[in-house]
């Protein structure tokens, strides 16, 4: 069914996953908001893969390992020297070789996270909305090894259970199994409670997730609750009221939803991504709470991951497009089923612009623009971009046209899920089944059509897709007409565009920014997607009054989709002679970018901090 060759090459783990496989992890941890760490133990259950296993090697990163035990006996262990991107391998010597590959065995590791942990962000009360309680959240995609010792590879799928002791409510990417006063509270430490969880569906380590803070929940559907700080609950419950429609549409297109619950967690502003598809509990940025439900496509994306990514999983980050390209494709199918095909194409046009931005940023010949890049000795975070999302979407969009349209392709989508659910696959596995399915269900005619696709150009060549997609531009045309009317107004010497309908604008031409700003108050628009595009346009046009708004946007929320391009753009700006009053009088953009970042460094999630520092050339200490 999947590439089953015994020694799979997984470039971004240091674990010996070809000798043993982790099948279950039990976490017994305490949240320490004072020392800003998680501490306790993890018990890992292993399947030997050979008849003689002498060692276990696990991924860790910035963990403090204090003891390793097996059958209550202390085991010898050591942490190898740190790999700059992949962390420190934990080598564990088994007391005697495990000689029966049918015999599972447990190892318990006592540890704490440390202040350099890249998977967790501890927030002080003032960094939260309510400003009264501390907050902890995780982001484990490629950083699980900094949360728990594990085989940190999407090729390994494991169940997990947890008992988490905390003074504040705890949620995880699992089903809740009740809570009880913790020994700490019984021993007099006030307010600690033990929260219990179980994830019975095997998942890759990157989907282990935890949050603890002043959380409240509001039911928004038959299997969904939205969770956030009390101050946001009304706005969040209204914003995400259509969640059940997305889930039900996903089931209609694909297969039944298997995860039980689909809850949403709205995080504090420093959350570094738009959303993270943690099973049972999607994490989302508060920038989606726009007040008009205009940005909920991201929730459709995260829901789509319940099938593509969380059930059918990429076997390594080199095939990340199988997670993200497929999920963007399913997301846009959900949008089409609910709001019509033109909306799917409008979203695809916006996505293609984002793909072009990434390819231009990396360079058209960059290996980072391959759909299946070689990640040997590469930190995947450095290759993260819209390429796996949008080049992957466009490959599937092109195949759908080649084979004969949705009537043929949509049933195949459901078959793909049924074929690979609960497995991790490579691009080769995916392609082999695509051919098998089309031959079995549609004969050699369609197979011949598949053979017309230049697979090497699509899968293994840099740059933009080899075939420029043809999309329905009916919705985009509204924007083009709006831009043309602004241009005409400018040519006629008018400088008040207020009379021009702004309903759908998403495309700007080079116009008088002051006039646009005066006509539409764009610098005060709450919608981050519009604000982000407006600010980038203004920076391109050296519209200096935008600088305070740029520094506000990059320091009031930490979503890298917005923060990284704006920092990069300011970095490359020439001097602003009369810098705005509260910004350092930067001699040039690079000082403005660096001084703004350094003044707010503690606000950002560790992953965002690391990548912004690389973007603006601040060597991490
Ligand atoms: C080609 C391989 C590139 C990367 C490998 C995999 C993971 C990279 C690591 O950086 C983790 C990324 C996590 C992303 C999580 C959520 C995104 O889908 C959000 C997209 C952007 C946004 O909306 O903010
Ligand atoms: Zn995604």
Image (cartoon, rainbow, N blue to C red):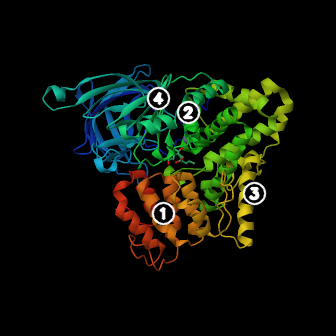
- Tell me the number on the disc at residue 303: 2
**Where 29 falls versus 181 (above or below)?**
below
Q: Secondary structure at mark 3?
A: helix
> Tag 1's secondary structure?
helix
Mark 1 and mark 4: Cα distance apart in space = 35 Å
Of the two numbered discs 1 and 4 in the rendering, the one whose residue sits closer to the viewer: 1
Task: Verify CB contact (< 8 Å) between mark 3 and mark 1.
Answer: no
Sooner in the amino-acid sequence: mark 1 or mark 4: 4
Q: Is residue 326 left or right of residue 105?
A: right
**Residue most extreme to the top:** 102
Q: Secondary structure beneath disc 4?
A: loop
Which label sits in the foreground, 3 or 4?
3
Marks 3 and 1 sit apart, C-alpha to C-alpha, by 28 Å
Q: SS of the residue at dot 2?
A: helix
In the picture, the quarter occupied by the C terminus is bottom left
Q: CA distance from mark 2 to mark 4?
A: 10 Å
Distance from disc 3 to disc 2, alpha carbons, whole Å, reads: 34 Å
Q: In the image, residue 242 lies at what x, y percent?
A: 56, 32
| Residue position marked by numbered label 3 in the rendering | 481
Q: Quadrant of the N terminus?
A: top right
Q: Which residue is mark 1?
A: 550
């Amino acid at each position: 069914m999947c590439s089953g060759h015994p020694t799979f090459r997984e470039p971004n783990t240091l674990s010996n996953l070809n000798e043993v496989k982790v099948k279950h992890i039990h976490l017994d941890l305490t949240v320490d908001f004072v020392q800003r760490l998680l501490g306790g133990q993890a018990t890992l259950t292993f399947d030997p893969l050979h008849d003689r296993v002498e060692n276990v090697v696990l991924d860790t990163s910035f963990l403090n390992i204090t003891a390793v035990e097996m059958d209550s006996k202390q085991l010898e262990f050591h942490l190898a020297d740190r790999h700059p991107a992949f962390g420190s391998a934990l080598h564990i010597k088994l007391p005697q070789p495990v000689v029966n590959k049918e015999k599972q065995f447990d190892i318990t590791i006592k540890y704490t996270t440390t202040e350099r942990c890249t998977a967790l962000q501890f927030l002080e009360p003032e960094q939260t909305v309510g400003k009264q309680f501390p907050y902890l959240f995780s982001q484990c995609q490629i950083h699980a090894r900094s949360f728990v010792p594990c085989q940190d590879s999407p090729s390994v799928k494991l169940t997990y259970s947890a008992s988490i002791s905390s003074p504040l409510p705890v949620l995880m990417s699992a089903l809740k199994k009740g809570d009880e006063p913790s020994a700490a509270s019984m021993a007099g430490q006030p307010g600690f409670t033990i929260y219990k969880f179980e994830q019975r569906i095997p998942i890759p380590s990157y989907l282990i997730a935890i949050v603890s803070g002043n959380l409240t929940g509001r039911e928004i559907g038959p299997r969904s609750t939205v969770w956030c700080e009390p101050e946001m609950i009304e706005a969040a419950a209204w914003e995400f009221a259509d969640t059940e429609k997305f889930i039900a549409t996903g089931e209609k297109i694909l297969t039944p939803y298997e995860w039980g619950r689909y809850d949403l967690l709205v995080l504090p502003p420093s959350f570094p991504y738009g959303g993270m598809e943690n099973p049972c509990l999607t994490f989302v940025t508060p920038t989606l709470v726009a007040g008009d439900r205009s940005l909920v496509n991201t929730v459709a994306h995260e829901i789509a991951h319940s099938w593509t990514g969380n059930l059918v999983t990429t076997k390594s980050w080199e095939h990340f497009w199988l997670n993200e390209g497929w999920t963007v494709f399913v997301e846009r199918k959900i949008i089409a089923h609910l709001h019509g095909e033109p909306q799917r194409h409008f979203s695809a046009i916006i996505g293609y612009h984002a793909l072009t931005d990434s390819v231009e940023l990396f360079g058209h010949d960059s290996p980072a623009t391959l759909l299946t890049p070689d990640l040997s000795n590469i930190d995947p975070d450095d290759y993260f971009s819209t390429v796996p999302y949008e080049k992957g979407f466009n490959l599937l969009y092109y195949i759908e046209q080649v084979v004969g349209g949705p009537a043929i392709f949509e049933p195949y989508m459901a078959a793909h899920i049924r074929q690979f659910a609960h497995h991790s696959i490579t691009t080769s596995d995916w392609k082999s089944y695509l051919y098998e399915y089309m031959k079995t269900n549609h004969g050699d005619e369609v197979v011949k059509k598949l053979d017309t696709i230049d697979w090497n150009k699509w899968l293994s060549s840099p740059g933009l897709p080899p075939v420029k997609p043809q999309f329905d531009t009916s919705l985009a045309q509204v924007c083009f007409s709006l831009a043309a009317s602004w241009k005409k107004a400018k040519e006629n010497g008018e400088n008040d565009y207020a009379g021009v309908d702004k309903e759908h604008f998403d495309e700007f031409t080079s116009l008088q920014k002051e006039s646009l700003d005066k006509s539409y108050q764009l610098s005060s628009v709450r919608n981050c997607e519009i604000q982000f595009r407006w600010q980038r346009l203004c920076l391109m046009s050296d519209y200096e009054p935008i600088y305070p708004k740029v520094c506000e946007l990059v320091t009031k929320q930490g979503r890298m989709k917005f923060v990284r391009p704006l920092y990069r753009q300011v970095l490359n700006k020439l001097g602003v002679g009369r810098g705005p009053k509260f910004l350092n009088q930067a001699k040039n953009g690079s000082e403005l970018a660096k001084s703004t970042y350094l003044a707010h460094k503690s606000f950002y999630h560790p992953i965002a901090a690391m990548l912004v520092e690389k973007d603006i050339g601040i060597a991490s200490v």
